[in-house]
Image (cartoon, grey):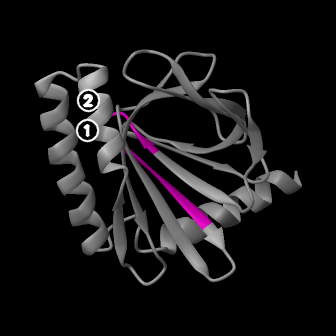
Amino acid sequence: MKLSTGMTVPIHSYKHDQKLHRIWKKAMVLEQTQTMLVTANYRTRVIECDGRSWHTKEPAICYFYNDLWFNIIGMLKRDGVYFYCNLSSPYLYDGEAIKYIDYDLDIKVFPDGDYMLLDEKEYQDHSRQMNYPKEIMDIIESQREELIRRIELREKPFCLSDIEQYYELYKSLTKK
């Protein structure tokens, strides 16, 4: 299903056991290509699976892929752009929301390009509890390596010019 620039949609994150993990109430579509979807949000309400909610604090540009097992969130903070990368299933849009399965492992990238692997224990625990298939674990491991390669080489969106262009587009669309 095709999304159009300027439309707003929710984002639903699930866990492997098909339980809803987190909802972003709205994100604005900036671009959709054959393999990538780019959205933006700012001060959007996020609802956790336990019912708690909070609002995002800074503008974010989000990259979802239908052929890669990760998504990337670029957060525009005062001291630079931070990236939060989720190892996840490719996204799908079913007319209700942008949806993906979160596979726990995350990578945080700092404005200077340094990065940190996060949630490895959670990944190990969930892989046992939810019986992640070996094929999925192999994909997650290879995609983590691909993501690290892109971070280290500062490929898009880690080169920042992409984020800046999408943020300008987002600001122009929100003024309309």
**Which portion, as a residue range, is magenta?**
64-75
In the foreground, 53 or 26: 53
Task: Report helix, strand or loop for mark 2.
Answer: helix
Q: Main secondary structure of the magenta part?
A: strand
Q: Is residue 2 visible?
A: no
What type is the residue that disc 1 sits on?
A: Gln
- Which residue is found at the position 34% from the left and 31% from the top? 89
> Do the numbered discs 1 and 2 sit on residues whose CB atoms are within 8 Å?
yes
Direction from residue 77 to residue 81 in the image, left or right: left
Neighbour tally class for label 2: few under 14, some 14-19, many 20 plus, Cα within 10 Å: some
- Which residue is found at the position 78% from the left and 60% from the top? 172
Neighbour tally class for label 1: few under 14, some 14-19, many 20 plus, Cα within 10 Å: few
- Which residue is found at the position 88% from the left and 51% from the top? 176
Direction from residue 160 to residue 44 in the image, left or right: right
| Residue 89 colored in magenta in the image | no
Decide: is 162 above or below 126: below
Decide: is 174 above or below 159: above
> How many labels were placed on the picture?
2
- Which residue is found at the position 12% from the left and 36% from the top? 138
What type is the residue that disc 2 sits on?
A: Ser
Q: Position of residue 135 (x, y in %)?
A: 12, 26
Q: Quadrant of residue 34?
A: top left
Task: Report helix, strand or loop for mark 1.
Answer: helix
Residue tagged 1: 124
Residue tagged 2: 127
Q: Is residue 90 visible?
A: yes
Q: Position of residue 151 (x, y in %)?
A: 31, 68
Q: Position of residue 41 (x, y in %)?
A: 70, 50
